Every structure is written in structure tokens, then in C-alpha cells.
Amino acid sequence: MRRDSRLTTIIEALQKMGPHSSAVRLWGRAPGATGEDGATGNVWAADVHDVARHVFTRLYGRPDTTPAASPLAQADAAKRARDLPGELNALMSGHYSLTTAPWYPAREGDLVHVAFEAAGQAPAFGETYVVEPRGGHPDDLKLRLLHHTAPDDSAGFFAPGLVGDGISELWMEAGPHRLTVIRDGQVVHDGGRRGRGSAAARILFEAEHHAATMREVQRYLERGEPELALARLQSGQPLPPCGAPGVTPEQPDCPRPRGHRPPCSDTADYVAPPHECPALPEQLYAVLSVGPKRTTVSFEGLYAEKDAALDIASGWDQHAEAERRVGKGVPDYVFVDLPAPGGPSLAVVAPMPVKPDPRAEDEWAAEGMAAALGPDDYADDYQDRDDEPTADEAAGGVR
């Protein structure tokens, strides 16, 4: 059983309050009563551990005295008790607690310390691992033993870890209560701490993690890369580099975020130019067809080139005898008479000038108003004329 370090600190502080080196009981006098010696208040005594537990409960809540065990140890205990649901629950809960941790997955450079308690004649010892890529691949991580305090050379059992995720084996076998994970100089998982302090640390880390995510998403959106912003939100982690090999052996692999728009680049901050829709022509040509009985009108399409519209109206030369003529009073229109079994049909090629978007004109006008000069820009011309008249004004008698 691991005792909370805060409770141990309170116990040690209370033990050192008395005149003896290690007090086991505390004495006091209750208010509201008079003792035999004439002193006010009855004398009371309490065990140091009981007082410490009372103080701890008032500050942090009831201490967790549940015996700590790794998920694998819990599964083994359930297996010995022939409790198959309990065994599966221990394994699944252990895996879920790891994969839902706000700092998961581990990253290159993370430090993982595991603390083992004393057992029998074996003293307590610790091991410190560093997370590194396996084989140079950023998504395949392993553990490398940095230091240990074991009495023999049996340390480093958990290195290099499982393929793809070096920390899961350590989490399941040693247990999350023995692990301390440090990232960028900050403790992101402290298995030795429980209660409200650990929950507060978790909430703080989640808030910082969310803020970092939003900063990256905003940066991608400001750079015109919404696809990277979406990928960042979906992954919950910083986007790894693209890693596409350079064109030449001297050119480094592409450091741009994975999932970027082409092309690849040797600069991480390179931004591909955003897509630009082609500008509309000044005039388009619509093709309309009128049935033989002049009772049906069909829209056949809209074309940028007049020749293309005429080809569609004539049926791509399927009707060699089709007659093209210009309408009276509408010289820009072309009428095509087509022979048909039920009587001649008619196709019309009508020009359609593309008018400017009225909303664009409003925006242009608003920009002009914002850039126009106002009275503040001509203060001398708009100010009240309380000064002396000029020579011309004095000579003409007009002010």
C-alpha cells in the first residue's frame, strides 16, 4: 500500500511538535469546562495518526487507502479467483486509462520514471527511461534505460517496450501508480499522487493541452490551410512532419505537416498558394431549344465561346441543312432552324452579359468610404475661423 506523501508530511510535522523526538499522542484542553486543577477545559488526548488523517481529510478529502496494483496484477488476482469478467475488466480498464490520458501517446523526449517499493529483503529502487524513435521512424517509439538504482544489473526490463508504443507494457505491468511521466520539464503524470491534487493537475494539463491545440488550429486557419486545422482537431496531437524524401539526396525530407497540399518543400513554414477560381468572362452564351409546336422551351447549356454555343444549337453538324439567321431587332441573337419529323424546331443562341455582383460593389463602396478623407484630414479647412481676416478679405470687406 502506498501512503500519500502529503499525509506522511502531516504525520511527521505533528510528531515533531512535542518535546520528545517522536510523539505518538497529542494532548489538549477542551474549552467550556473546568478541571480539578482549576484550569478551564477538560484535557483530551489523540493519536498523531488520527489527527493527521483528520487534517488531511479537511484539506484534501478522504485519503485513498485502496491497495495499489498494476492492471496486470489485478488481472492475475482475478484469474486466480476464477473471475473471468474481473480479469477482462482489469485489462480493459488499464488500457483505457492509458489511451484516454490527456498526455497520451508518449512523445520523443519524454522521461518515464518507475518507482518500485521495497519487497522482503530487496530495497526500494527506481528506473528512468527516455522515449526515443525506433529505427528513425517518428511513429514507432521505444524506451531506453537512462539510470537506475537497483542493487544489481537486472534493471531495464521494460526496454525497449512493445513495437509502436513503448510505454504500454510498462503501464500495464508496473502500473500507473508507480510511474512519473515528464514532458518538456513538466510532470504530466504523477502516479504517486492521488486525490484532489492529482485531479487538479490533470485538469490543468488538459486546459493547457486544449489551449495549445487551439493556437495551432488558429495558425493553420490564418495561413489558409483549413485541411491541416481539421486534421489537428481530429488527431488531438501535433501533426507529424510529412517526411517525403527530397528530390535530390542533398535535399532534406519534407518537414511540412502531414496532410498538407502539394507540393512538398524543404521549409516547414512553406504555404501552398490557395485555390483561386477562374474569373468569369465578360459575356456568356445560352442555348435554348423550342419544340416543333412552340409549346416547350428547354435550356441546353451556358457556354463561354459563341462558336461552341452554335455547335450545340446545330447539333454538332448533325443537321447540315440547319439554317442560321439573325433575329429582327435583336442582332446579337442567332436563331437556328432545325428540321424535325413533327415539324421544324428552333434553337436560340442568346448572349448574356455577366453583370458585376452587387454585393461586391457594396464591399468596394465600403472600402472606398473607409479610405476616403474626412474632416480630420483637412483640419485647417474645416476649423472655425476665429482668427484675423486675410489681406484679401480685409480689402474686400468680406470675412
Image (cartoon, rainbow, N blue to C red):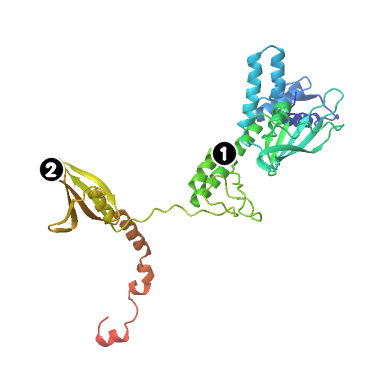
Quadrant of the image occupied by residue 191: top right
Looking at the image, residue 323 sits to the left or right of residue 239; the answer is: left
Q: Residue furthest top?
A: 82
Q: Is residue 235 above or below residue 355?
A: above
Residue shown at 63% from the left, 15% from the top: 85
Q: Nearer the viewer, residue 35 or 138?
A: 138
Circle 1 SS class: loop
Q: Position of residue 332 (x, y in %)?
A: 19, 58
Quarter of the picture holding the N terminus: top right
- The total number of labels drawn is 2
* Residue topped by disc 2: 343
Q: Residue 261 placed where, x, y %?
A: 51, 49
Residue 68 visible? The answer is no
Q: Residue at x 57, y 47 (%)?
A: 257
Q: Amino acid at mark 1?
A: Gly
Question: Looking at the rendered structure, which numbered label has been put on residue 236?
Answer: 1
Q: Position of residue 323 (x, y in %)?
A: 17, 53
Residue sitting nearer the eye, 366 or 196: 366
Mark 1 vs mark 2: give the one in front: 2
Residue beneath the point at 66% across and 22% down? 91
* Residue 233 appears anywhere in the view: yes
- Could you say where residue 171 lies in the image, as x and y percent from the top left? 70, 29
- Res. 341 mark: none
Q: Quadrant of the C terminus?
A: bottom left
Quarter location, residue 381: bottom left
Mark 1 or 2, nearer chain start: 1
Question: Considering depth in this image, is 34 or 167 the residue closer to the camera?
Answer: 167
